[in-house]
Image (cartoon, helix red, strand yellow):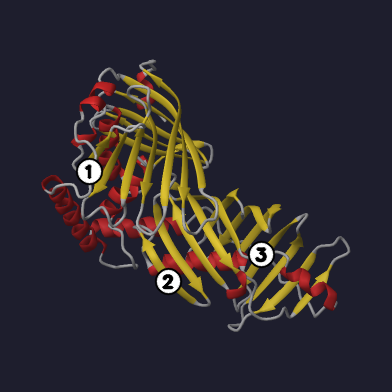
Amino acid sequence: MIRRKSLGICLLGFLILSAGCVSISKTTLSPGSPEDLPRCYTIFPAEPWESVYKLEATLRGGSFSLLGVTKGEPSERRLQSLLLTPEGFILFDAELRENEIDVRKAVAPFDSLAFAKGLMENVSFLSLPPRVKPTGWEKKTDGTMICNWEGPDDSDTEIKGSMESGWRILRRDKYREVIKEAVLNGPFVNGVASHVELRASEPAPYTLRMTLVQPSP
Amino acid sequence: MKYASLFWILGALHLGISEKPSESVLAEESKMKKILFLSLLVSTTLLLPGAAPSQDWTPVKEAFRNIRSVKADFFQKRFLQILTKPLLSEGKLFYNTPDSLRWEYLSPLRSVMLQKGSIIQVYNFSEGAWKPEMTQAVEARRMVLAEISQWFQGRFEESKAFKQAYSAGPPARVILFPGEGIKKFIQRIEIVLSARPGVIDRVEIEEPGGSRTLIEFKNVEINSGFPSEVFEKP
């Protein structure tokens, strides 16, 4: 039982990483020029893609270095993600199809439903656009885009940036608190960012640093 | 020897892989340990199916007879069904008879397993420093490293987890067939021996479902000598 608890703590540790989210004020936008609208989707790969990232997570009392492998089928909103040890041992394998998560393999401490849900939500946050059309967007004079989507649960998603300067994705809850933030920096290889830093505040604050080691075919 | 691939199997058995998330990890782990025990039992009592090649291990023993140490680079290709291209890794290994081993990945993740006698240490390089492995795979790795140590000495037939077959070739090769518990994760391991005595050219591990791992060894140095601290510090 103690061992089981320790595994749970380890899993929690994976989620409880180094820093929380910074409160960032929301930019109020209205629908912009129709020809600028497609630029709101530039950040999200449009074609089938694959990636291998080095994942670094610092936890209280230790750290994790793993490989994250993801394959995306944007047209079907389908994502498959694996976590591997340096040796190639698969610790976690799950697929997200629409809103259904199918966990094919999960090794402790990555074997909780909460972990699977959190991981697939993060992958989705980074690679799939919201289902609805943006409620507002604007192209700045320096070429950067700001786009905003309102979610069904009164949450909202905002992206800001460009392929040249990098992108920031924010998700706020209904209280307008930032609950998830990602910074994506280039170079972008087949639409996949080389460097990603993800911060989230739920269920506990954590940060995940990702470095692309093998891009799309 | 997807030396690494053994990790999944043995590691998976040790850690208690669940096909679906489960709350009863301890029960699952206990069950898997029983399966492992049974698989070892079965593997040591059943005849090897389809093992047509020669079972005379004399040439292998002779080739490895004078091995005292091995140093080599390795290049690993992990073929996953999810990926169009294999996942590439590379690293270095150091081995001293009878039971000192350093198995180090240099890229894409830096990680090292150290064995000196019965002491096993695993470290990952993160944020500019070596940090001890946090998962509970150390015991599994001990089993793996013991297996590898036997291979470097040419003692393939002593494996308790696998049934073996030897084919004189050329190239000479050793084929390992897992027992019942393990073959859920590994279908077959093929170790291809070099014409150079005591040298392993490559290892290929096949898994059910089509995934496989290929490890090739280059720049192999036999009995060249190196400081013993390579087995002690990351």
Closer to the N terminus: mark 2 or mark 3?
A: 3
Q: What's under tag 3, amino acid-wise?
A: Pro
Residue drawn at point x = 34 percent, y = 50 percent = B8
Q: Nearer the viewer, residue B84 or B143?
A: B84
Residue drawn at point x = 36 percent, y = 63 percent = A111
Q: CA distance from mark 1 to mark 2?
A: 41 Å
**Dot 2 lies on which element?**
strand
**Dot 3 lies on which element?**
loop
Please say if A43 is above or below B182. below
Please say if A138 is above or below B93. below
Residue highlighted by disc 1 = B52
Q: What's under tag 2, amino acid-wise?
A: Asp
- Name the side, left or right, on which A38 lies relative to A155: right
Quarter of the image holding residue B67? top left
* Quadrant of the rendering where the N terminus of chain A is positioned: bottom left
Q: Position of residue A95 (x, y in %)?
A: 47, 68
Q: CA distance from mark 2 to mark 3?
A: 22 Å
Q: What's under tag 1, amino acid-wise?
A: Ala
Residue highlighted by disc 2 = A102
**Dot 1 lies on which element?**
loop
Q: Position of residue B118 (x, y in %)?
A: 23, 32
